[in-house]
Image (tube, grey):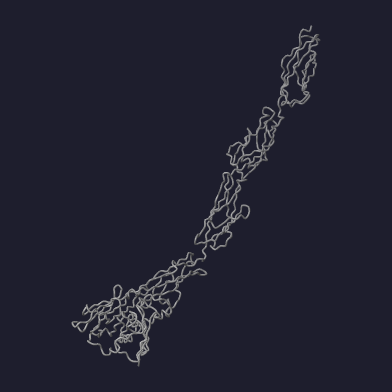
Amino acid sequence: MNDNAPQFRRDVIHLDISEATPKGERFSLSNAVDPDVGSNSVKTYHLSESDHFNIEVQTGREGSKFADLILEKTLDREQQAVHNLILTAVDGGTPARSGTASVIVHVSDTNDNAPTFDKVSYNIKVMENSPIGSLVVHLNATDLDEGSNSDITYSYSLYTSEKTQETFHLNPSTGEITVKGMLNYEDFKIYDMEVIATDKGANSLSGQCTIKIIVEDMNDNHPEISIKSFQSPVNENIELDTVIAVVSVSDKDSGDNGVVDLHIPDNMPFKLRESSDNYYELVVSEPLDREKVPEYDVTFTVTDRGSPPLSDNETMTLELLDVNDNVPQFSQSFYTIRVMENNAPGALLSSLAAFDPDLHENQYLVYFILEKEIANTSMSMLFSINPENGNLYALKTFDYEIEKEFLFHIEARDSGSPPLSSNVTVHIIIVDQNDNAPVIVSPWRAHGSVVEEKIPRSTDKGSLVAKVIALDTDSVHNSRITYQFLQVTDATLFSLDQYNGEIRTMRMFSYRDPRHQRLVVIAKDNGQPALSATVTIKLSTVETAVKAYSDLTEVPLEYDIFSDLNLYLVIGLGSVSFLLLITILVTIVLKCQKPKPSKAAPPCRNSVLSERNSTIADSTLVSNDAYWYSLFLAETRKGKLVVRQPVPKGSRYIVSSLPRGTGLTDTSDSAASTLQYPK
């Protein structure tokens, strides 16, 4: 009887089938056993529904039944790694009995899947100057296989350059790409690489991806300046807009980081002119003057527009060459040099050195005296100048009484090409020394003899009895004369005017007064020390007037003679020697050549014309003036001309008179009268 159900030896049947097994492949399954016999034994097998498997029941030699598992469809482990099937054994009894066993098919892996990356291509941006070791990207490839078939290693393909491999490190296990070398945008902006992922299967498979690493710019490069051409030194008179230098600028950065601006200091006579992209010309914008600024340190400063901006600078020195564009300059436009008379020949008078701000031969000066003749005497015979240093020397001894001043020009000339020169006016003033003693010109005396005069004893009080006149050829200050009594017989009888030398009676003569009076008068000048001259006057009194005087005691003039007539008259007596006559004639010649008011002159001047001897006396008469004084005496206080001796008949005298003065005055201011006696 069918009292036993079929039973498999194992409840679970495990099969390992490679996914690479071809379709139709058979796999033997354990058969089921049934203790019953005959028709009640195992009759057939059934397999649970499956797309990949089916069974085929086979009959053994002994009539036993067993089943083969047939692969109907290729397996794919990556899709289904395990297939769970139910194998059922059914007997032939009635009712039929059955038994089941689980068939677990394990699909074993084969390396049939290549690794794949998350992306086929990557675009990665990285900042330049990223530190070494910093992560750029983490690549991830997967393999659907398992085991060693899914173990992946990463590597660069042959298409990846050595530069890229030197710059970036690829971890073969993790797929991390890190910075290996310095990134510089200015050197390489883009790195292209291809990475391969390979599994470790027996027949390894691989996949690849492309990576583009873009280096982003940072403002890490300073602008650069390059001086392409530079002209130095240059002449100081270089024309405006002349190109001195050509400068180029650059910046390896990009964008605003690579945009640059070039500047020079504002306080310079130059300007920048852009000639082309990043090329500039340095041109002259203002006149140059080496004497003010001999050289310029021109600093070029270039700045980019990055944030923060970077800059650089370059300095060049521009030297200016001298041009002879400056005339020599004296420290004064007019030199007044005072020279004491009686100087030693060869004495240094002054240094007239000029200055020339130019250089080298342009500043080497030579000095000259511009020729000028005075009284047929060249200036170069009177003065000498050192041509190298401008020292001015006197070549002779000067005498104030002969030469009072000189006016000439000194020229300073440089050695440039062409030479430049300038001149200066030099005024030499001879300073007077008190080296001339007063000379008594009135009353006239011969060889220092005593002057003898006769006066009536009845002379009134205040009457003029004599007048002493002294001349001094020194300057006004030194020639100022004062008169004093050195000796006088009776100090109560006579007075002496210290300024005009008039000797007058202070009272009338008495019977007690001696008949002869001796007066010694000293004339002193105003110099330091003072010089002097003396005259001795012997006055003799007579009881009655000489008969010769009776006819013409007083002759009234046709005009009032001024009080200083004698003073002006005696100046006509001037010189007492031929030497003085020559001196005055030379002075007159000098004044004719150069009309200029004399700074110092005798106190007065008179002109006397005598028809008898046809002699004109203009401060030059000597013997004739003495003759005049013997005929007439001017009483200055009363303005009268007193006749002292008989006047020859037929003579006519023209008398001109000037008022008192301290210097020479023109005779046009004088008053004149004619004194004539019948023949």
Residue farthest to the top, as pictured: 1
Q: Is residue 422 above or below residue 212?
A: below
Residue farthest to the bottom, as pictured: 679
Q: Is residue 149 above or below residue 667?
A: above
Q: Is residue 401 above or below residue 353?
A: below
Relative to the observer, which residue lies in front, 506 or 81?
506
**Can you give x and y, in whole percent of width and height, for residue 345 in the image?**
36, 75
Q: Is residue 126 above or below residue 89?
A: below
**Can you give x and y, in whole percent of width and height, for residue 364 in the image?**
47, 67
Residue at point 38% right, 71% down? 338
Relative to the observer, which residue lies in front, 257 or 672?
672
Relative to the observer, which residue lies in front, 666 or 545?
545
- Tell me if residue 122 can be seen: yes
Picture quarter with the C terminus: bottom left
Q: Is residue 505 left or right of residue 28?
A: left
Residue farthest to the left, as pictured: 512
On the image, which quarter does residue 61 sit in? top right
Relative to the observer, which residue lies in front, 492 or 174?
492
**Can you give x and y, in whole percent of width and height, for residue 521 in the image?**
26, 79
**Can you give x and y, in whole percent of width and height, for residue 72 in the image?**
78, 23
Q: Is residue 615 left or right of residue 204?
A: left
